[in-house]
Amino acid sequence: MNSFTGGEILDQILFSGCFVCGPDNECGLKSTFRALETGEVEGVFTPDVKHSGYEGVIHGGIIMGFLDEVLGRLAFNRDRLFLTHTLEVTFRKAASPGKRLTAVAKEEEWSKRKFKATGTVTDEDGDIVAAAKGTFLVMSEKMEKELLPEGRRMKDEG
């Protein structure tokens, strides 16, 4: 199950076909996310067999995609969109199909045009599956306007 016990789920699905969060992507992760009181972002998903690289082992690219989304969504806390610039992931333990994964991302540095973040993915036992650090570009307001349908702006312009 890809939901939380308590807490407000972020309504930030901008494209229903998104691989990581899109509810309409058959092969996708269907992850859900929430902003924590600390300013961190938490995401959850339960990988399926179709996300495997080897039998019984979730593909590392799936874990990387999940981390990329969780770290990048820190921009949503500031009502902005993001583009990934760099992402470095260290894998520590294999993840298994059917076992819920939780990721938490923390903002390390913010400037007008980019931000740096760190995060981890843990399994149901609380063991760290992977850790990441990345640099993300803050999307220009012009690009946001081009990508988002009318009425779906991340921040109020006025």
Image: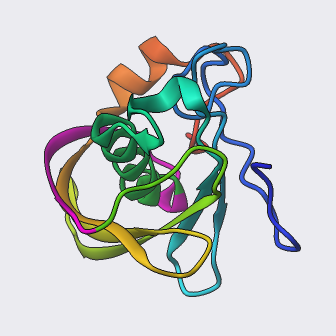
Our reading of the magenta stretch's main secondary structure is strand
The picture places residue 15, in percent across and down from the top left corner, at: 60, 19
Residue for point 48% across, 42% down = 56
Estimate the x, y position of residue 17 in percent, counting from the top left.
60, 14
Quarter of the image holding residue 75?
bottom left
Residue positioned most to the bottom: 38
Q: Residue furthest right?
A: 6
| Residue under the image location 44 percent in, 60 percent down | 74
Left or right position of 9 against 130? right
Q: Which residues are magenta?
A: 77-92
Counting the numbered discs, the total is 0
Q: Nearer the viewer, residue 45 or 43?
A: 45
Q: Is residue 85 above or below residue 92?
A: above
Q: Residue furthest front?
A: 55
Which percent across, then down, holds residue 94? Answer: 36, 57
Residue at figure coordinates x 41%, y 43% from the top left: 57
